[in-house]
Image: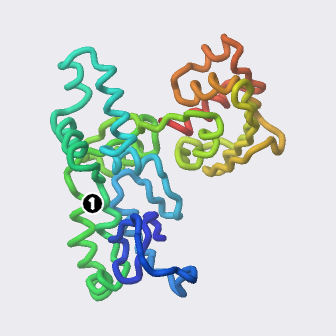
């Protein structure tokens, strides 16, 4: 697996898509790890990614990639439906969604959802089929392939308050930025805890060195610990360590707050969400997970 989180085939490089394989033969042995890493660690995927989802240190920002590249897939479709519902008129809808976006959504619904970016796959020189163009003239390959993808005129879809919004504004000031919902909404306390690593925004966690304890009650009973430190997140079931903030909430209210559907003051006023510690730490936590 390369830094771009695509599977790299020794021959075809990153230009493969995994699907279902039906075979008639009996499989009597498992595959073995390769004795070398096909990823060249060239950094080209990092350079062309318009959302900054591929970090130089190897970290990957799933939700930033998801919100842009998969705009016409399930999450983006849900975000588009929300725009339709929230619009008060046709004029209001057109302020929220451009005609090209509407046409693009219709096309993808008609023919099957496609991806919107895939620059990391396009630029990847790994694999026997592509490496021959890269190794003899790395500078030329970068100028002909990477720069063309890097300089493409396009709209980049970002979640408001995300690392991607800050990144594209600074790195690609000439590109158009469109703020959208990720379409990801937690349906349960367990689902939210499990998906925290996918939606965590490292840049938004700057300065945090905090341990959170969560206790969900009611229809769904769950305890969890979340530690945010040095721009990284660790989460686990159960309580561990000494918390800087302890949150006790009815599961339904807690999930509603985490999904940005209920404000913190309202949740506290109903006493279905209680905190032991500074409310600022709760707001800092929510900022790390824009949806």
152 horizontally vs 201: left or right: left
Residue 117 % position (x, y)? 30, 55
Using a 10 Å C-alpha cutoff, classify the residue at mark 1 as few (fewer than 14 neighbours), some (14 to 19) or many (20 or more): some
Question: How many numbered circles does the render carry?
Answer: 1
Residue 169 % position (x, y)? 34, 44
291 horizontally vs 266: left or right: left
**Colouring style:** rainbow
Residue found at x 46% / y 70%: 2
Residue found at x 54% / y 49%: 198
Residue 270 % position (x, y)? 67, 11
Residue 222 vs 73, above or below: the answer is: above
Circle 1 — which element?
helix
* Residue 194 quadrant: top right
The residue pinned by badge 1 equals 150
* Residue 273 quadrant: top right
Residue found at x 21% / y 56%: 152
- The front one of 17 and 63 is 17
Residue 113 % position (x, y)? 28, 49
Residue found at x 70% / y 26%: 219
263 horizontally vs 250: left or right: left
Residue 53 vs 290, above or below: the answer is: below
135 horizontally vs 200: left or right: left
């Amino acid at each position: 697996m390369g830094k771009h989180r695509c599977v790299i085939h020794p021959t075809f490089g990153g230009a493969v898509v995994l699907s279902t394989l039906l075979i008639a033969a009996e499989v009597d042995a498992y595959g073995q790890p390769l004795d070398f890493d096909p990823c060249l660690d060239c950094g080209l995927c990092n350079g062309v990614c318009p959302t900054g989802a591929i970090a130089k240190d190897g970290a990957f920002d799933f939700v930033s990639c998801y919100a842009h590249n998969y705009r016409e897939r399930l999450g983006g479709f849900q975000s588009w439906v929300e725009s339709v519902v929230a619009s008060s008129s046709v004029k209001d809808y057109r302020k929220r969604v451009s005609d090209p976006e509407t046409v693009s959504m219709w096309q993808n619904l008609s023919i099957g959802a496609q991806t919107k970016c895939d620059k990391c796959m396009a630029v990847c020189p790994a694999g026997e089929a592509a490496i021959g163009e890269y190794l003899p003239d790395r500078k030329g390959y970068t100028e002909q392939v990477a720069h063309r993808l890097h300089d493409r005129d396009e709209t980049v879809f970002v979640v408001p308050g995300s690392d991607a919004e800050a990144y594209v504004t600074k790195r690609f000031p000439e590109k158009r930025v469109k703020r959208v919902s990720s379409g990801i909404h937690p349906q349960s306390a367990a689902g939210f805890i499990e998906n925290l690593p996918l939606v965590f925004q490292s840049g938004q966690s700057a300065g945090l060195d905090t341990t959170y304890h969560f206790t969900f009650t009611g229809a769904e009973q769950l305890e969890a610990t979340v530690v945010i430190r040095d721009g990284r997140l660790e989460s686990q079931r159960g309580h561990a360590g000494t918390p800087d903030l302890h949150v006790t909430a009815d599961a339904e209210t807690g999930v509603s707050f985490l999904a940005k559907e209920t404000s913190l003051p309202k949740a506290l006023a109903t006493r279905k969400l209680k905190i032991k510690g500074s409310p600022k730490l709760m707001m800092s936590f929510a900022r790390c997970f824009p949806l």
